[in-house]
Image (cartoon, helix red, strand yellow):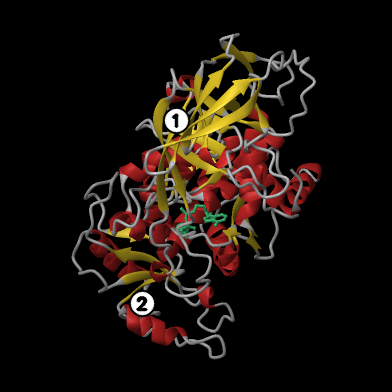
Amino acid sequence: MENFITDIIEEDLREGRIDGVVTRFPPEPNGYLHIGHAKAVCINFGIREAYHGKCNLRFDDTNPTKEDVEYVDSIMEDIRWLGFEWDELHYASDYFDQIYEFALKLIREGKAYVCDLTAEQIKEYRGTLTEPGRNSPYRDRTPEENLKLFEEMRAGKFKEGEKVLRAKIDMASPNLNMRDPVLYRILFASHHRTGDKWCIYPMYDFTHPISDALEGITHSICTMEFEDHRPLYDWVVDNCGFEKKPHQYEFARLNLTNTIMSKRFLKRLVEEGKVSGWDDPRMPTLCGIRRRGYPPEAIKTFCEEVGVAKAVSEVDFAMLEHAVRDELNRKAERAMCVKNPLKVVLSGFDGPEEAVFEVNPNEEEKRERKIRFSREIYIDAEDFSENPPPKYHRLKPGGVVRLKGACIIAFEEAVKKPDGSLDYLRCSVVPHSHSGADTSGVKCKGVIQWVSAEEARPVTLRQYDSLLNPEIPEGDFMERLTPDSEHLFSAFAEPYAADAPTGTRFQFLRMGYYIKDRDGSFIEIVGLKDSFRK
Ligand code: ATP
Ligand code: MG
């Protein structure tokens, strides 16, 4: 890992500005993590690994109305799935007492005041990018008055929106975030951890720098939209009096083509029943991607290849699929499955009754597996053509084809049903053509997968289109959804695959990569063909 942030870290270490690097990943527990978050996870935990530092997991839970333990649990599971473990686990809400004390300190020092303007008035007084703001009429309250009012806010004496605590900075600052930002608001909401202890809650911009400083975070890494908040971050750190100062650095968030990357929108898909849940295999959530069969190693490789930069860009989804395919090509076991079963009856079948199948030709140590071979097998109906186009190398009248791991078979007859449709094929085994010991001298260009009819197990295959229709590149995403993006097929698979534990990934020969889902069906992870161009 090497990027502008690691350059900064290395310089900080070299110059002795820090003894060690401490980062944190600070999700808000208001939804499930998505592939964009994986990038932030990989950056923060990747730095921990590269510099033997520390990385904390901190739930940024200052928004009681939108947060829930369900999300807390899923976030921890997802980070661990990616292969990372945090040093310390924190909740911003654990700091509420301390944050409150810092607010009192600012009030006493005349750096914060209670303001009675409504949210709308505050906005109006704030000014614009071209016009300075106006001071609130409540700006000059004495510290004593402010202390009393703030304590009354905490005691529940005022209604929501009636009063807020604001920092007293500069209403003429060219940075809107510095124009007396709100530090605390009143919310009569139960918090998933602190219950009803508080009816005032600190804002993100106040909570985050304090939490970072309390944990000794050295590099507080976040996405570009917080760049304009950095002066406020520094103001809070300085004015709360922290000696060891954390610093904020921003990078560009990950955007993927044709992919919804916002918890809010993903939540809508779940709530409006457009998908089966947060872990629907079409969802870009980490649990969805996990269920879909993307290996965590591939996600890490992908994040590494995307890199860390400040310029916002959109990454081709095919690049993620490329990383997944590459990982699976190296790691996934091969197995056989036929999608449109066509029965083939073999004559001249004199054994062996087992075919030998290589588990994965890309493994260093060759592993083989025996497969039942029998007089009746199924092949994919697409691998036979009565009127083949030129250069058709699969089964055709007068032709031969190799059965993977078994032998060459020669076409004899296409047996029809009374209505004229194809019933089954009769083929003959070419003598001495067994795979690995072929002395037949028969030239055979095509190799196809097959399943023994004695053992063939019916399985359901599930294939998915992307949730967003690539043909509608803009507009309200709810209107961009692909209709009927789930496709089911029945197929025959070898028992080895059909009986594999949930979560096992296979390359189904000549078909694609599949993962066994919890209901016993197989979800297509990615196809075999790579559409990604660097
Ligand atoms: P969303 O917009 O999807 O709700 P968020 O930014 O509100 O995401 P947080 O829980 O606040 O979600 O995010 C936790 C961390 O993950 C933050 O540091 C945030 O900057 C980072 N993050 C969120 N989305 C992305 C993304 N698309 N690419 C990179 N980092 C991201
Ligand atoms: Mg956020």
Q: Residue at x 33, y 54 (%)?
A: 270
Work out whether 70 lies above or below 343.
below
At label 2, the amino acid type is: Arg
Work out how far the residue at label 1 is from the one at label 2, CA to CA, in angstroms.
78 Å
Q: Which residue is tagged 1?
A: 492
Measured as percent of width and height from the top left, residue 182 is found at 41, 70
Q: Residue at x 27, y 61 (%)?
A: 151
Q: Is residue 15 left or right of residue 27?
A: right
Dot 2 alpha-carbon crowd within 10 angstroms: few under 14, some 14 to 19, many 20 or more: some
Q: Residue furthest bottom?
A: 131
Measured as percent of width and height from the top left, residue 534 is found at 75, 54
Q: Residue at x 58, y 25 (%)?
A: 427
Viewer can see residue 21:
no
For label 2, the SS is: loop
Measured as percent of width and height from the top left, residue 179 is found at 49, 77
Work out whether 488 lies above or below 120.
above
Work out whether 384 lies above or below 469.
above
> Which of the pair 423/59 is nearer the observer?
423
Q: Residue at x 60, y 64 (%)?
A: 224
